[in-house]
Amino acid sequence: MLLRGINVGGKRKVPMADLRAMLEHAGYDRVRTYIQSGNVIVESDRPAAEIEDHVEATLERALGFPVLVVVRSEQQFRSVVAKAPERFGAEPDKHHSDAVFLKAPLTSRQAMGVVQLREGVDEAWPGTGVLYFQRLSAERTKSRMGKIVGTPEYERMTIRSWATMRKLLALLDEKPAD
């Protein structure tokens, strides 16, 4: 699961140890987190939409502020990585590459409608429940990715760098200790 907007700029602080404890107390198994930005791996038999609703309600009660939660099954997450555009994320020194996860009912078609691209700087591709967004690292300050901030669609998105995506994939490959 991916949490939006926690521990950004010193606001909405949520220590990962506390987050793990909250989720374990809420009934999720084998809870693991990666870095401080709300990347969580859990085991559950519940449907994704039910997990999203349950975790959002649980966190709002515990933290006192709403947190958008986007859940992808392991299979869905692996599909996002496998179906990335050719060479996406392959040149991290040249391109800054992000996966922009979309919370239903937001679709990639709707999200692409608010994405503005600067020719020669930005590229974006729709996927299933995700947008792939890449910009030239040397021209990042000229990117128009920031133009999505403030749109209603942006409120239903959470962004992960491709490096984070690769690390989460590696964590999924690890067998958690019993």
Image (cartoon, rainbow, N blue to C red):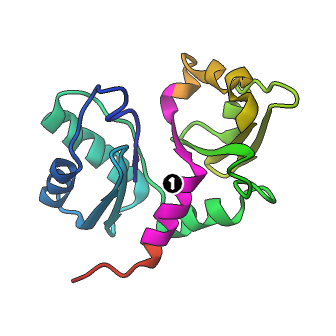
Q: Secondary structure at mark 1?
A: helix
Assign the magenta stretch its main secondary structure.
helix
In which quarter of the view is residue 43 placed? bottom left
Looking at the image, the residue that sits furthest to the top is 150
Residue that label 1 marks: 164
Q: Horizontal placement of 155 versus 24: left or right?
A: right
Whether residue 109 can be seen here: no
Q: 47 above or below 155?
A: below
Residue sitting nearer the eye, 72 or 41? 41
Q: 35 above or below 5?
A: below
**x and y percentages locating residue 89 in the rendered image:** 70, 54
Check if residue 8 falls in the magenta segment. no
**x and y percentages locating residue 55 in the rendered image:** 27, 47
Check if residue 170 falls in the magenta segment. yes
Q: Horizontal placement of 166 versus 127: left or right?
A: left
Residue shown at 51% from the left, 41% from the top: 103
Instruction: Rate crowding at label 1 as few (under 14), some (14 to 19) or many (20 or more) other CA atoms within 10 Å.
Output: some
Amino acid type, mark 1: Thr
Q: 97 above or below 109?
A: below
Residue shown at 29% from the left, 30% from the top: 66
Residue shown at 61% from the left, 48% from the top: 129
Q: Horizontal placement of 58 versus 116: left or right?
A: left
Residue shown at 87% from the left, 31% from the top: 120
Please count the marks in the image.
Answer: 1
**x and y percentages locating residue 111 in the rendered image:** 67, 32
In which quarter of the view is residue 143 placed? top right
Quarter of the figure that contains the C terminus: bottom left
**x and y percentages locating residue 19 in the rendered image:** 21, 49
Residue sitting nearer the eye, 76 or 2? 2
Quarter of the figure that contains the N terminus: bottom left
Whether residue 80 can be seen here: yes
Q: Magenta stretch?
A: 155-171
